[in-house]
Image (tube, grey):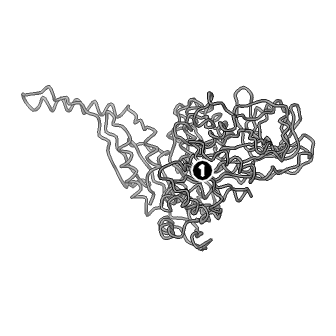
Amino acid sequence: MSGTPPEHIRNFSIIAHIDHGKSTLADRLLLLTNTISQRDFQDQLLDDMDLERERGITIKARAVRMFHEKNGIRYQVNLIDTPGHVDFSYEVSRSLAACEGALLVVDAAQGIGAQTVANAYLALEHDLEIVPVLNKVDLPNARPDEVAMEIEQVLGLPAEEALHVSAKTGEGVKEMLDAVIDLIPVPRGDPDATFRGLIFDANFDDYRGVIVYVRIVDGIVRTRDKIAMKSTGTQYEVLECGIFEPGMTKIASLAAGETGYLICNIKQLADVHIGDTLHLANAEVGALPGYKEPQSVVFCGLYPTNPGDYDNLRKALAKLHLNDSSFHYEPETSGALGFGFRCGFLGLLHMEIAQERLERESGLDVVQTAPNVTYEIVDHQGEITRIDSPAKLPEENLLAEIREPFVNLNVITPAEHLGAVMSLCIDRHAEMKKQEFLSPERVMISFEISLAEIIFDFYDKLKSISRGYGTMDYEIKGYREASLCKLRILVGGEEVDALSAIVRKDAAQRFGRRLIEKLRSEIPRHMFDVPLQAAIGGRVLARETIKALRKNVTAKCYGGDISRKRKLLEKQKAGKRRMKSVGSVEIPQKAFFAALSIDRD
């Protein structure tokens, strides 16, 4: 046990737009507080995944305990580093639930970014104290005074209170840490009450089982205590308590206000629910506020390249779901790809990262299909069936109607981008319901729109046209009849259901032609001609042909009768026909990605 009284503990997160220097600032804090020595130091110390280092982004939230002395008092400072990209905002919300304050870091050269605004409002929703920090003030093009006024204008945080720091040089970092102690409230909770803790993250270790990341709210938990999870009532014995310094360090107990980890010999991944409340076994306590379930906006199928890896993929997805609970999956079957899983993600980067993590951490090769949503189909007898794949859509003559999910969509954008946002939504067949100015500079517009119109690239385009300031939220309203059809994609005469899509009838031909043209450039040439077709039912809308690789068999005929050349060409043609009858077309992963980059309008 650290022995630190609750009034000398501070818990805070660092939140920022991507690439505003958040991880560098966390590194500087670790050095300043002597949590890590200069000898052991490396850049992006808390970003321990290869993917994080390669891309220069934070994907997983990380906790670390530091100590800082101010006015002769030694304070325990618990930092939870958070991701910056919008796709990982759920990681941020979980971190904020375990804190009382947040450092809002803004690049003094770039100014306020998209996630700056989103994370600030996220922190306000959690009722946290926000401390604005202007980073990179050492840059020649830094404009700290202007950016401080931007923060005041957009977020209402006084410009004169913004701290000026440089994470790279260390300028102002000590003063920032002093401000954390002065401005961020002491931990909420009662140190004398019965133990309650909030699970804000979890990780799976092959040798030790599930490692639970916990923020102690009330009381104290010790090694050998019997604890239970509020949602399931399952009981466990605490085998080890510990803290992050930043490596895992074993201690005897964790007290109210502290952040650390518990190892309880939990072997079943499904037993841990992020946001659940831990308490002493047989004790009656109230549940702590959990988290709002994340809403997946991109859905796709993941299939093992080798069908024998299905069980391994299922285990890998279960492990990934524990470490990233904003990712969801369920089994599905494809005629072309076999058994796999339909997965939901928070965005395209989230989807890309999840696939890379699966391949790296589990050594699996997976094929990823184009995104889709769930539809309702009504037959002529009035029976309603839900389908989650275009392959399951019956023939058109068997259907009375097709219904697609509709959502209430709220878009918040700066007023100057109102026209562009309206055009984007109307182009996606949205129906505007109301418009409300939140301030002279910000406006909220409400729409009814098909979920299929926003799952793919809507959020990216919204960010683009609003210069990063636009935000969106939606809730499912129900299903509504729509003029839809199944666009079949045939490669070499065989339908590839993983590339098929359910699209609007008026946009089917344009979408089909663009997709076929894209596939022609992505699928490699074979030893025989490969026809590509887009069709609705038996009617072909577009066709392209990938020409065969050919050897110049007439090269040796430098004279003589033309019949000699014709004989060689006919022999080659016969060989191509035989090859086509037994050959199979290999469709690479990038061809499936091609379907992701096609506009459906």
Exactly how many numbered labels are in the figure?
1
Image point (36%, 49%), residue name: 517
Image point (63%, 59%), residue name: 384
In the depicted structure, whether residue 338 falls above or below residue 517 = above
- Among the 4 quarters of the image, the one containing residue 235: top right
Three-letter residue code for mark 1:
Leu
For label 1, the SS is: loop
Residue 545 lies left or right of residue 485; in this view the side is: left
Q: Position of residue 125 (x, y in %)?
A: 71, 59
From the viewer's side, name the closer residue of 445 and 571.
445
In the depicted structure, whether residue 463 falls above or below residue 252 = below
Residue 502 lies left or right of residue 215; in this view the side is: left
Q: Is residue 289 visible?
A: yes
Q: Residues within 10 Å of mark 1 (few under 14, many from 20)?
A: many
Q: Is residue 345 visible?
A: no
Disc 1 target residue:
346
